[in-house]
Amino acid sequence: MSQVQLGDVGTEILVTVKEDGLPADISTATVKKFLLQKKNRTTLVVDASFVTSGSDGQLHYFTSGSEVDIKGTCTLQVYLELPDGKWHTSKSEFTVEENLVATA
Protein backbone atom coordinates (compact mmCIF):
# COMPACT_ATOMS: atom_id res chain seq x y z
CA MET A 1 0.00 0.00 0.00
CA SER A 2 1.15 3.53 -0.68
CA GLN A 3 2.31 5.71 2.16
CA VAL A 4 -0.59 7.85 3.32
CA GLN A 5 -0.15 11.42 4.52
CA LEU A 6 -2.65 13.40 6.55
CA GLY A 7 -5.26 14.97 4.24
CA ASP A 8 -3.98 13.31 1.05
CA VAL A 9 -6.28 13.45 -1.97
CA GLY A 10 -5.77 10.88 -4.73
CA THR A 11 -3.54 8.44 -2.85
CA GLU A 12 -4.24 4.88 -3.99
CA ILE A 13 -5.17 2.32 -1.37
CA LEU A 14 -4.52 -1.05 -3.01
CA VAL A 15 -5.48 -4.45 -1.57
CA THR A 16 -5.04 -7.95 -2.94
CA VAL A 17 -7.73 -10.29 -1.63
CA LYS A 18 -6.19 -13.70 -0.98
CA GLU A 19 -7.45 -17.18 -0.25
CA ASP A 20 -5.03 -19.76 1.12
CA GLY A 21 -2.21 -17.27 0.51
CA LEU A 22 -2.95 -16.84 -3.21
CA PRO A 23 -4.79 -14.03 -5.01
CA ALA A 24 -8.51 -14.86 -5.08
CA ASP A 25 -10.60 -14.56 -8.23
CA ILE A 26 -13.21 -12.01 -7.17
CA SER A 27 -14.23 -11.05 -10.71
CA THR A 28 -17.89 -11.97 -10.06
CA ALA A 29 -18.20 -9.66 -7.05
CA THR A 30 -21.25 -7.42 -7.35
CA VAL A 31 -20.44 -5.42 -4.17
CA LYS A 32 -16.89 -4.32 -3.32
CA LYS A 33 -16.39 -2.12 -0.25
CA PHE A 34 -13.49 -0.94 1.88
CA LEU A 35 -14.30 -0.44 5.54
CA LEU A 36 -11.84 2.12 6.95
CA GLN A 37 -11.64 2.64 10.70
CA LYS A 38 -9.76 5.74 11.81
CA LYS A 39 -7.75 6.04 15.02
CA ASN A 40 -10.77 7.65 16.73
CA ARG A 41 -12.78 4.45 15.93
CA THR A 42 -14.97 6.19 13.30
CA THR A 43 -15.63 3.71 10.49
CA LEU A 44 -16.23 4.79 6.90
CA VAL A 45 -17.48 2.58 4.08
CA VAL A 46 -16.28 3.42 0.56
CA ASP A 47 -16.76 1.74 -2.80
CA ALA A 48 -13.73 -0.14 -4.07
CA SER A 49 -13.01 -0.89 -7.73
CA PHE A 50 -11.21 -3.65 -9.57
CA VAL A 51 -7.70 -2.70 -10.65
CA THR A 52 -8.13 -4.91 -13.73
CA SER A 53 -10.78 -7.63 -14.03
CA GLY A 54 -10.80 -8.85 -10.43
CA SER A 55 -9.38 -12.25 -11.38
CA ASP A 56 -6.12 -11.17 -9.70
CA GLY A 57 -7.89 -10.29 -6.42
CA GLN A 58 -6.87 -6.64 -6.64
CA LEU A 59 -9.10 -3.80 -5.50
CA HIS A 60 -8.30 -0.14 -5.05
CA TYR A 61 -9.68 3.17 -3.90
CA PHE A 62 -8.32 6.72 -4.19
CA THR A 63 -8.51 8.92 -1.09
CA SER A 64 -10.60 12.09 -1.09
CA GLY A 65 -8.91 13.52 2.02
CA SER A 66 -11.79 13.17 4.49
CA GLU A 67 -10.98 9.54 5.28
CA VAL A 68 -7.35 10.34 6.17
CA ASP A 69 -7.96 13.43 8.29
CA ILE A 70 -6.68 11.97 11.58
CA LYS A 71 -3.06 10.89 12.04
CA GLY A 72 -2.39 7.43 13.39
CA THR A 73 -3.25 3.84 12.64
CA CYS A 74 -6.12 3.14 10.26
CA THR A 75 -7.65 -0.34 10.04
CA LEU A 76 -8.89 -1.63 6.68
CA GLN A 77 -11.21 -4.52 5.88
CA VAL A 78 -12.71 -5.56 2.54
CA TYR A 79 -16.37 -6.58 2.21
CA LEU A 80 -17.44 -8.54 -0.88
CA GLU A 81 -20.68 -9.95 -2.21
CA LEU A 82 -20.36 -12.69 -4.83
CA PRO A 83 -23.03 -14.97 -6.33
CA ASP A 84 -22.16 -17.71 -3.83
CA GLY A 85 -21.87 -15.65 -0.65
CA LYS A 86 -20.90 -12.53 1.30
CA TRP A 87 -17.51 -12.16 2.98
CA HIS A 88 -15.23 -9.90 5.00
CA THR A 89 -11.48 -10.27 4.68
CA SER A 90 -9.10 -10.23 7.60
CA LYS A 91 -8.13 -6.75 8.78
CA SER A 92 -4.93 -4.92 7.87
CA GLU A 93 -3.49 -1.63 9.06
CA PHE A 94 -1.74 1.38 7.62
CA THR A 95 -0.51 4.58 9.20
CA VAL A 96 -1.69 8.07 8.32
CA GLU A 97 1.44 10.19 8.76
CA GLU A 98 1.53 13.80 9.95
CA ASN A 99 2.87 16.50 7.61
CA LEU A 100 5.48 19.14 8.34
CA VAL A 101 4.15 22.59 9.16
CA ALA A 102 5.92 25.66 7.80
CA THR A 103 6.72 28.22 10.50
CA ALA A 104 8.29 31.00 8.41
Image: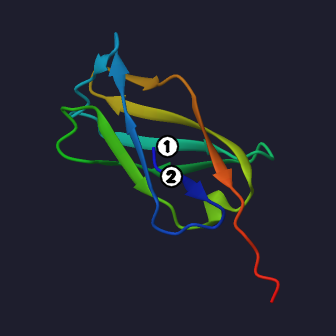
First along the sequence among labels 1 and 2? 1
Q: Is residue 53 above or below residue 8?
A: above
- From mark 1 to mark 2, how far is it between C-alphas? 5 Å
- How far from the left and from the top, in percent, is residue 103? 82, 84
Q: Is residue 10 above or below residue 36?
A: below
Instruction: Say what amino acid the circle numbered 1 marks.
Output: Phe
Give how far across and how far down residue 55 sits, in percent: 18, 32
The residue type indicated by label 2 comes to Val
User: According to the image, label 2 marks what residue?
Assistant: 46
Residue 9 pos. (x, y %): 52, 69
Which quarter shows the N terminus? top left
Q: From the viewer's perspective, tell me whether residue 65 is left or right of residue 73.
A: left
Residue sitting at 17 percent across and 42 percent down? Answer: 53
Q: Nearer the viewer, residue 73 or 51?
A: 73
Disc 1 secondary structure class: strand
Residue at horizontal 74 percent and vertical 54 percent from the top: 71
**Left or right: where 1 falls relative to 40:** left
The one nearer the camera, 3 or 18, is 3
Q: Quadrant of the C terminus?
A: bottom right
Q: Are marks 1 and 2 in contact (CB under 8 Å)?
A: yes
Quarter location, residue 19: top left
Residue 28 versus residue 36 in the image, above or below: above
Q: Residue at x 37, y 41 (%)?
A: 31
| 10 Å crowding of disc 2: few (<14), some (14-19), many (20+) | some
Q: Residue furthest front?
A: 104
Q: Residue furthest bottom?
A: 104
Residue 93 is labelled as none
Using the rendered view, name the quadrant where residue 83 is placed: top left
Which residue is identified by label 1? Answer: 34
Assess disc 1: are there few (<14), some (14-19) or many (≥20) residues with their C-alpha within 10 Å of its C-alpha: many
Q: Is residue 7 left or right of residue 27?
A: right
